[in-house]
Each structure stands twice: as C-alpha cells, then as structure tokens.
Amino acid sequence: MIALDDLTCAHGAHPAIRHLTGRFAPGSLTAIVGPNGAGKTTLLRAIAGLHGETTGTITRGGRIAFLPQASTLERAFPLSCADVVAMGAYAASRLFGPAADRNRIAQALATVGLSGYATRLVGTLSGGQFQRLLFARLMLQDAPILLLDEPFANLDTSTTADLMRLLHQWHHAGRTVIAVLHDTVLVEREFPQALLLARDLIAWGSTDTTLTDANLCRARDHAAAWAAGTPPLRDAA
C-alpha cells in the first residue's frame, strides 16, 4: 500500500501538489492524469522519495522502482544495452550471481523485443527501442511497486501495445503499478483506476467515475486558475 496523508509538495515557494489524501491499494493499476502543470511528475517523484514533502506524509509499503521520463535521461554515455539492464540487477541488491544475471539480462531483452541487442550502444537506439530497454531494466529491479512517468510518450502504436502488455503482466503478478499519462483514451481503455490531479485532488477512484467530462472540466478550470496566479479554493474531493 502507498498512503498519502494531507500531502503538500512545493517547488520553492510555489505548491506543486496540495493537501492530497488517499491510498493506492496493493496490486492496483492506476493512472495519474491531469493538465500540464498539474503536479503529476512531482507526485510520482515524491512517492519515489525523490522530492521531499513540505507538509503531510507518505507511507510506502514496499521497495520501489522508478522509471522517469525518457526525455530526461542522458543517452550519450558509451553504455551497452546489457549495461543498462544490469543496473536493474544492482538495484535489486545483487540477489543473483554474474552468470544468473547474464541469463536474466538476455531474457529481459528478449521479453521486450530486443533479442541480440546486448552489445548495442544505447546511443544507437531509436526512441521506442530505448523505452523497451528501460522496461527491461525495470524487470530486473523486481520491485513490488512500479512508478512510471509518461512511459508511452512519443511511441508508436505497436511499441505502446507491447509495453502495455508488460504492465498488465506485472499487475496480474500482484505488483502495484502507478503511471503518469496524458492520453485519456489509453487510460480509459487500459487502467481500472485513475487519479485526476490539478495540484489539488479532483477525483480518485475507478476510471469511469474519475474521468468524467465534469471532472475533466474542473481540472482544466483549476489548472487555469493556478496559471493565472489565483489559487482556487479547495473544493475538490
């Protein structure tokens, strides 16, 4: 379980998320949705322990693996695909020996459609191949809680479908999966739970009752008020 209790996080003097309370149930599959500037990435980073709380608390019920936005990652280092995936094994506290790691790396690469890519340099990969590689690294981290920030941004339909199948496999295996997404059509089709955010909490629950036209309109109005410098009242539930 991950529980938020009156959580506020800020960038300097400006709140990025404000007074969030709620819980992600163990084994749930949840999308965090909201307008630009809604605080989605800040919330995910706070859950991962990478952004400190201003007020309130976060209770985390297990080890966490975090996949940041691919656009924020440096790809110029001369690392091979196997090197990147191996970082997941190290993050998992080296529970396996070198030979087992090599087998698991090869299996992970095959699972994401990158068989034969172990020695390829990361800088030679396309955007879709690089995202597949990051999913392979997540596999070796073997964490019960997976946090993903815009995992399908700028990917083609085929790659998105392949990686979405992996998310469902992890979910069905009992892992808690939380992803920041902007594609509400994808969320409505693939994610049973959703959290709609506009710095304040707008709605949180089943996707069909969260992503209603009324709630999406409230989120847009909320975000516009923040952008105009007139913080809205805490009228969201």
Image (tube, rainbow, N blue to C red):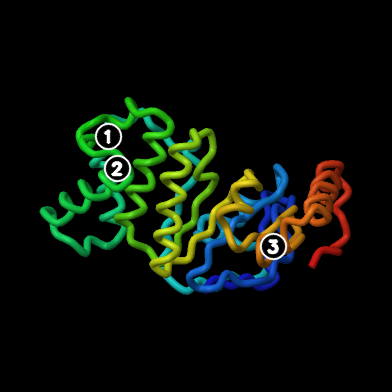
Say if residue 119 shows up in the picture. Answer: yes
Q: Quadrant of the C terminus?
A: bottom right
Residue at the (71%, 44%) spot, across then down: 37
Which dot, 1 or 3, sits closer to the camera? 1
Q: Tell me the crowding category of disc 2: few under 14, some 14 to 19, or many 20 or more residues within 10 angstroms, Cα based.
A: some
User: In the image, what residue type sits under mark 3?
Assistant: Thr
User: Which is more toward the observer, 35 or 164?
Assistant: 164
Residue that carries the numbered disc 1 in the rendered image: 79
Would residue 158 be found to the left or right of residue 201 on screen?
left
User: In the image, what residue type sits under mark 1?
Assistant: Leu
Element type at marker 2? Answer: helix
Image position, residue 143 (x, y; %): 37, 63
- Asked if disc 1 and disc 2 are in contact, CB closer than 8 Å, the reply is yes
Residue that carries the numbered disc 3 in the rendered image: 8
The number of callouts visible is 3
Image position, residue 5 (x, y; %): 66, 73
Separation of marks 3 and 2 at Cα, in angstroms: 34 Å
Would residue 230 be found to the left or right of residue 7 on screen?
right
Q: Quadrant of residue 215?
A: bottom right
Would residue 119 be found to the left or right of residue 44 on screen?
left
User: In the image, what residue type sits under mark 2?
Assistant: Val
Q: Earlier in the sequence, mark 3 or mark 2?
A: 3
Image position, residue 203 (x, y; %): 74, 63
Q: Quadrant of residue 31?
A: bottom right
Element type at marker 1? Answer: loop
Residue that carries the numbered disc 2 in the rendered image: 84
Q: Earlier in the sequence, mark 1 or mark 3?
A: 3
